[in-house]
Image (cartoon, rainbow, N blue to C red):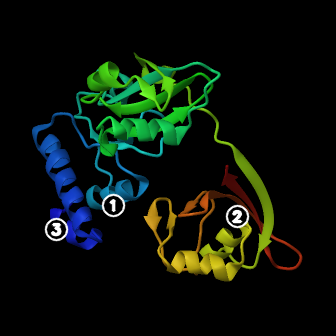
Amino acid sequence: MDRNNIEKIAHSAEDRMLLAKLWDKINAGMRKNIPANSCFLSPRELEMAKFLFGEPEGLYAFGGYGEAERKMLIFLPEYLEESALYGEDSPVVCLRASFYEGDSPNHRDFLGALMGAGIGRETVGDICVGKGSCDFFVTAEIAPYILQNFTSAGRTKLHIERIPLAEAAIPEPEVKEIRDTLASLRLDSVISSGFRIGRSLAAQYVSGGKAAIDGLPCEKPDKAVAAGAKISVRGLGKIKLHSVNGRTKKDRISVVIHRYV
């Protein structure tokens, strides 16, 4: 852990400001041996934070459930066990918005309504929309305000309540499974297969700064992709290189790609 690494990790003034705030808050908790946490971080921001802090004991990335995309960086002193992340005093709170099942608000509707209510994006984690309800994760500080003021998403009326983190309903993501063979595991090849576009167009997306692997921007079309990696392409969506299954008789690589729909 070295604060001077901020300059090596940051790609912009915004990155430097974010990492400096993270350092001050988390490092203060470590020095005083008291709980400390960040706001919700995007996958890219979380990866930068991991480079900055490494993997010290007591430091967790937590977003309310195991597969959360947006997570907080949380320090727990030695007198608190990991189970405290799910307890009443957790910095992550789950709120359930119930609504008439005949309505069909989506993720964008809920996020837009929250932002429209003056709620900062950094205080909101994942938003999990189901039938008749939406469970979403927020910081403990903003939860009381939302409970009192968040009454609708578009034209959909909402009933908001706090629920235990363990009771959150996390819908299974809808994916389309793609089985294919590739000449290599280059990023442009995986994108070409996953989104059914030409490899030259896939390379243009990457070179144009529109692609990210596990939240980290990548502008190298020939970057090797590992099994399990999630790839997002602005304007196209998100895919996951689910598995790599060896080579075919024609010496091509057999893969399974999941495209999120």
Q: Nearer the viewer, residue 204 or 257?
A: 204
On the image, the x and y values in percent for residue 15 come to 26, 63
Q: Mark 1 points at which residue?
A: 48
Instruction: Report the amino acid beneath label 2.
Output: Gly
CA–CA distance in space, label 1 to label 2: 27 Å
Q: Mark 3 = which residue? A: 4
Give the distance between the C-alpha atoms of the residues marked 3 and 2, in whole angstroms: 39 Å
Q: Nearer the viewer, mark 3 or mark 2?
A: 2
146 on left or right of 176? left
Residue 28 image offset from top left, x and y in percent: 12, 45
x 47%, y 74%: residue: 209
Q: Indicate whether 84 appears above or below 110.
A: above
Mark number displayed over residue 92: none
Residue linked to disc 2? 194
What x and y, as percent, mark residue 200?
Answer: 66, 83
Q: Which residue is drawn at 52% across and 27% down?
A: 134
Are circles 1 and 2 on residues that touch, CB within 8 Å?
no
Please tell me how crowded label 2 is: few (under 14), some (14-19), or many (20+) other residues with Cα within 10 Å.
Answer: many
* Nearer to the camera, 81 or 204: 204
Q: Kindly state the secondary structure of the residue where label 1 is placed.
A: helix
Structural crowding at the residue carrying mark 3, measured as other residues with C-alpha within 10 Å and reported as few (<14), some (14–19) or many (≥20): few
**Kind of residue indicated by mark 3:** Asn
Q: Relative to residue 106, is residue 51 depicted above or below? A: below
Q: Are marks 3 and 2 in contact (CB under 8 Å)?
A: no
Q: Please report whichever mark, 3 or 2, sits nearer to the chain's N-terminal start.
A: 3
The N terminus sits in image quarter: bottom left
The structure residue drawn at horizontal position 42% and vertical position 54%, both measured from the top left corner, is 43
Residue 259 position by quadrant: bottom right
Q: Could you tell me the amino acid type at mark 1?
A: Met
Label 1 environment density (alpha carbons within 10 Å; few <14, some 14–19, many ≥20): many
